[in-house]
Amino acid sequence: MDTARLDRLQDVVLFRDLDLEALRMIAGACRETRLPPGRTIIEENTVGDSMWLILEGAVKVYKQDFYGGKEVITTLHEGDHFGELSLFDSAPRSAAVTTIKETVLLELRGEDLRALMDKDAALAKTIYEALIGELSNRLRESNEHLIYLVGKD
């Protein structure tokens, strides 16, 4: 895998503290996919076991609203990633993801990542520490947002 793709992988919070050798192992476990516009990658409320890194293109992330419509949450572009929490749990996906133009993705399946982590304790430790840090940050942000919402009433 070329240096630019390794750099993109290192931008993923779970992999940012990995050395070059570990990044190469992760890269070797990824599969590249090119998808046309309008292709659904993730369905909301389905169980998944993959994360994706956008190499080219863009996707929309959306949820079904109370009335059955689709509410776009965000748009992700080159260098962004999604689905990483499904590598570690089997909870249903919280949103749907669809390509909005031709998109090239790297997919990393959970079983492939877990196999690498089983073989390399240092790799596993680094990834788990990054995961714990990221989840802690998300929880703090959610708490702040909740405090703001409660305070508005």
Image (cartoon, grey):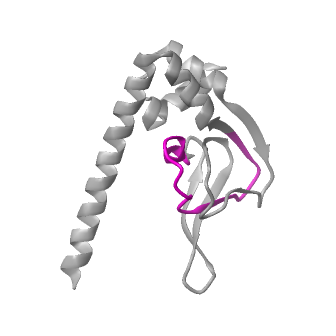
**The furthest residue to the right:** 36
Q: Nearer the viewer, residue 148 or 28?
A: 28
Q: Position of residue 126 (x, y in %)?
A: 38, 25
Q: Residue 143 occupies which quadrant of the picture?
A: bottom left
Q: Nearer the viewer, residue 98 or 136?
A: 136
Report the side of 100 relative to 64 (left or right).
Answer: right
Residue 148 colored in magenta in the image: no
Q: Nearer the viewer, residue 10 or 110?
A: 110
Q: Position of residue 117 (x, y in %)?
A: 50, 23
Name the image quarter holding the C terminus. bottom left
Report the side of 85 relative to 53 (left or right).
Answer: left
**The furthest residue to the top:** 21
Q: Is residue 4 shown to the viewer in this render?
A: no
Which residue: 22% across, 81% down?
A: 152
Q: Residue 105 occupies which quadrant of the picture?
A: top right
Residue 84 colored in magenta in the image: yes
Which residue: 49% across, 28% down?
A: 10
Residue stretch in magenta: 83-105
Q: Is residue 15 above or below residue 139?
A: above
Q: Is residue 58 shown to the viewer in this render?
A: yes
Q: Position of residue 6 (x, y in %)?
A: 57, 24
Report the side of 22 relative to 29 (left or right).
Answer: left
Q: Residue 72 occupies which quadrant of the picture?
A: bottom right
Which residue: 81% across, 52% down?
A: 36
Name the image quarter holding the N terminus. top right
**How many labels were placed on the picture?**
0
